Amino acid sequence: MKRKGAASGREKGAAKPFWLSKAIMAMTRVEWESLCARCGRCCVLKYEDPKTLKILYTKWACRYLDLETCRCACYRNRKTKMPECIDLYQCSVKVRAWLPPSCAYRLVAKGHDLPSWHPLKTGDPDSAKKAGMSVLGHVIPEPGEEPVTKKRV
Ligand code: SF4
Ligand code: SF4
């Protein structure tokens, strides 16, 4: 993912950073990708409580989540490796509701600003981890699967 110039996120002459001034469909692919804070929360297995309809997190992460970097180990090929993996660019509002409230894709879709710890604000690609906002140390590989964390596939 491109991070160059990420600390301000502003185009020359623009009063607001792109995530507050552009509609999602008007963002470049690079801008869109840079919204991801690399927290890894979307890659944790979840389920919906049938009674309360609340989204509940398990302690298991997708086998392709690198548990050290909190990044997908097969990002370019993820749809082939993990067909259930959802493309957030095309997902519905209902699916987006399964993302954590801190996820930039949820916040931006509602016209909200990014949190202060977000890499686009700090200029540090690891700032979600440093702020304790990632899944680092909180999840284990999903049961019955060998984790794929040592190399990108
Ligand atoms: S929850 Fe959102 S910000 Fe975090 S890794 Fe997933 S897409 Fe990126
Ligand atoms: S394939 Fe990659 S992006 Fe998709 S859920 Fe698994 S770790 Fe996350």
Image (cartoon, helix red, strand yellow):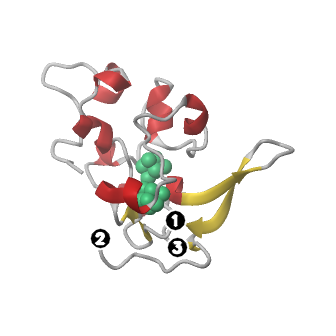
124 lies left or right of 56 = left
Q: Which residue is mark 3?
A: 137
Q: Earlier in the sequence, mark 1 or mark 2?
A: 1
Tag of residue 152:
2
**Residue found at the very far left of the displayed protein:** 12
Give yes or no for contact between labels 3 and 2 (Cβ–Cβ under 8 Å).
Answer: no
**In the figure, 124 relative to 118: above or below?**
below
Q: Residue at x 70, y 53 (%)?
A: 47
Q: Is residue 132 above or below residue 6?
A: below
Mark drawn on residue 32: none
Disc 2 residue type (three-letter): Arg
First in sequence, mark 3 or 1: give its number. Answer: 1
Disc 3 secondary structure class: loop
Residue 85 visible in the displayed image: yes
Residue 52 horizontal/vertical position (percent): 83, 43
Pointer 1: what residue?
62
Q: Is ligand 2 within 8 Å of the beta carbon of the residue shown at mark 1?
A: yes
Are there few (<14), some (14-19), or many (20+) residues within 10 Å of tag 2? some
